[in-house]
Image (cartoon, rainbow, N blue to C red):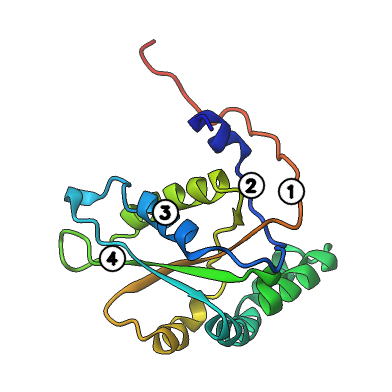
Amino acid sequence: MELSEAIKGRRSVRRFKPDPVPKEVLEDILDLATWAPSAMNRQEWYFVAAHGQKVEEMKRIFADAFQDIKPRLEKVFADKPKIIEATKEFFETYGGAPVFIFAYCGKAPDGKTWDTNSTAVAVQNLQLAVYEAGLGSTWTDGILGKEKEINDALGVKDRKLLCVLPIGYPDEVPRVPPRREDRVEWVGF
């Protein structure tokens, strides 16, 4: 697969088949994620891959997280109640994904802030590798209000949760959204 095909073909998948994802495939995907550039080459990202009973435990936490974002959804999508209901259902099921990957940040070079940028770049690598492997994923961060509960359940300390990616074989073909124009400005050409 050419890189341009992966970039243009990757979509946010929110419905998954129950088929298990081989651990070897996940190992390859996570290896490719760690080849991302990072601030001062510190590679401060950290990933936790979960499946089985841990996924079920996380779904209970995620279902509770919906209440944290519901008021914001009701404000933004006041005229679109189906979006709110679909979001609630997603938080309860996470699309049936058999695997969750939790992406964490370590400290930035200043030692005071979190290196979210480097982890975000690694997550982009991860999502492209997921697509190349014939799997689907989506970046989710609406659950961050439950970070302490998630970290406690996973045994993670001294790291900042950036996002959770449900991973699995797609059970949908998401539409291709149009690209917005006027997002690039040329200066001096």
| In contact (CB < 8 Å): disc 1 and disc 4 | no
Q: What kind of residue is marked 4? A: Trp
Which residue occupies the foreground of this view, 97 or 185? 97
Identify the mark nearer the N-term, 4 or 3: 3
Of circles 4 and 3, the one toward us is: 3
| In contact (CB < 8 Å): disc 2 and disc 4 | no
Q: What kind of residue is marked 3? A: Asp
Q: Quadrant of residue 166 in the image?
A: bottom right
Residue 40: where, in percent of width, then height? 17, 49
Residue picked out by circle 2: 11
- When the figure is inspected, residue 147 is found, relative to residue 112, above or below; the finding is below
| In contact (CB < 8 Å): disc 2 and disc 3 | no
Query: Which labelled disc corresponds to residue 28?
Result: 3
| In contact (CB < 8 Å): disc 4 and disc 3 | no
From mark 4 to mark 3, how far is it between C-alphas?
26 Å
Which residue occupies the foreground of this view, 10 or 83? 10
Neighbours of disc 1 within 10 Å: few (<14), some (14-19), many (20+): few
Residue picked out by circle 1: 174
Q: Residue at x 42, y 53 (%)?
A: 28
Q: Residue at x 41, y 59 (%)?
A: 27
Q: Residue at x 24, y 56 (%)?
A: 43
> Would you say residue 71 is visible in this rendering?
no
Q: What kind of residue is marked 1? A: Pro
**How many numbered circles are shown?**
4
